[in-house]
């Protein structure tokens, strides 16, 4: 009887632990309002080998998005706009477990493919690692943008339904102006819901 009770308790704890991990993956953070800042940054989201080379994106979609992303990078360089690349690495124990169970272990910290994909390697001025879909979760992006005087973001990358959306919403929660460059974004599924949610929170889809 006691052993069965212990098994039940352990199973319940495991379910709660995993549920917390699922919540953390998709949560959108809030932060201190940024105030009046005039600078702009170009944000490259999850353009990593494991997603770009092995993700569920059609070759034609990738080719079109790549051209737009590289054009955005060239424009940022010409205007002196900082380019910030974000790399996903699942490193929180519960999120690592979920990634291994439901994402084929892709982008778990320490695994192959978390580096920027070849078309975008060496093009960013700053590279930060994010632990969940919301790139602001660790606080490092807040610090960097404060140092750079950034108040507006242009976002390209993948995936619109997940990391692009959650990062855009977190940015809006802090008062950043957000422009999502739609043709420089990849998505594996319909994005209607994500687009409506971002627009309702003040993000511009260009």
Image: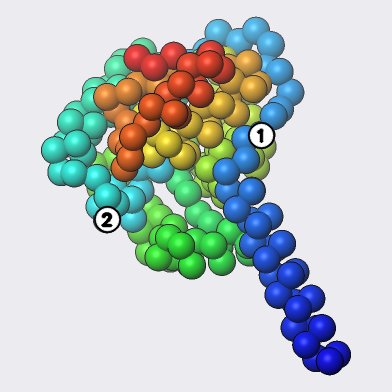
Q: Does residue 133 show up?
A: yes
Residue 125 left/right relative to 36:
left
Q: How many marks?
A: 2
Of the pair 190 and 60, the residue shown nearer to us: 190
Could you tell me residue 183's position as x and y percent? 27, 24
* Residue 83, visible in the rendered structure: no
Q: Which quadrant of the structure image shows residue 114?
A: bottom left
In the image, farthest residue toward the right: 2
Residue at 32% x, 31% y is 185
Is 129 drawn above or below residue 192 in the view shown?
below
The residue at the point 57 percent across, 43 percent down is: 26
Compared with 84, 58 (above or below) is: below
Q: Which mark is residue 17?
A: none
Q: Give left or right: position of 112 versus 38.
A: left
Q: Which residue is mark 1?
A: 29
The x, y position of residue 145, in whole percent, is 59, 25
Mark 1 packing: few (<14 Cα in 10 Å), some, or many (20+)? some
Label 2: which residue? 54
Q: CA distance from mark 1 to mark 2?
A: 29 Å
User: SS at mark 2?
Assistant: loop
């Amino acid at each position: 009887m006691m052993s069965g009770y212990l098994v039940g308790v352990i199973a319940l704890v495991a379910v709660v632990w995993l549920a917390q991990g699922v919540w953390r993956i998709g949560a959108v953070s809030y932060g201190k309002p940024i105030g009046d800042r005039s600078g702009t940054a170009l944000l490259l989201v999850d353009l990593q080998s494991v997603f770009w080379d092995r993700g569920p994106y059609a070759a034609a979609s990738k080719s079109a998005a790549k051209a737009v992303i590289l054009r955005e990078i060239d424009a940022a360089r010409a205007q002196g706009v900082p380019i910030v690349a974000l790399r996903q690495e699942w490193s929180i124990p519960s999120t690592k477990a979920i990634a291994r169970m439901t994402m084929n272990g892709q982008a778990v910290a320490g695994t192959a493919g978390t580096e920027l994909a070849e078309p975008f390697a060496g093009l960013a001025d700053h590279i930060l690692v994010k632990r969940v879909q919301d790139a602001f979760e660790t606080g490092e992006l807040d610090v960097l943008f404060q140092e750079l005087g950034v108040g507006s973001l242009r976002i390209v990358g993948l995936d619109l339904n997940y990391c692009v959306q959650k990062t855009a919403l977190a940015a809006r929660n802090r008062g950043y102006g957000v422009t999502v460059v739609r043709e420089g974004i990849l998505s594996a599924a319909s994005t209607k819901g994500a687009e409506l949610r971002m627009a309702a929170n003040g993000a511009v889809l260009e």
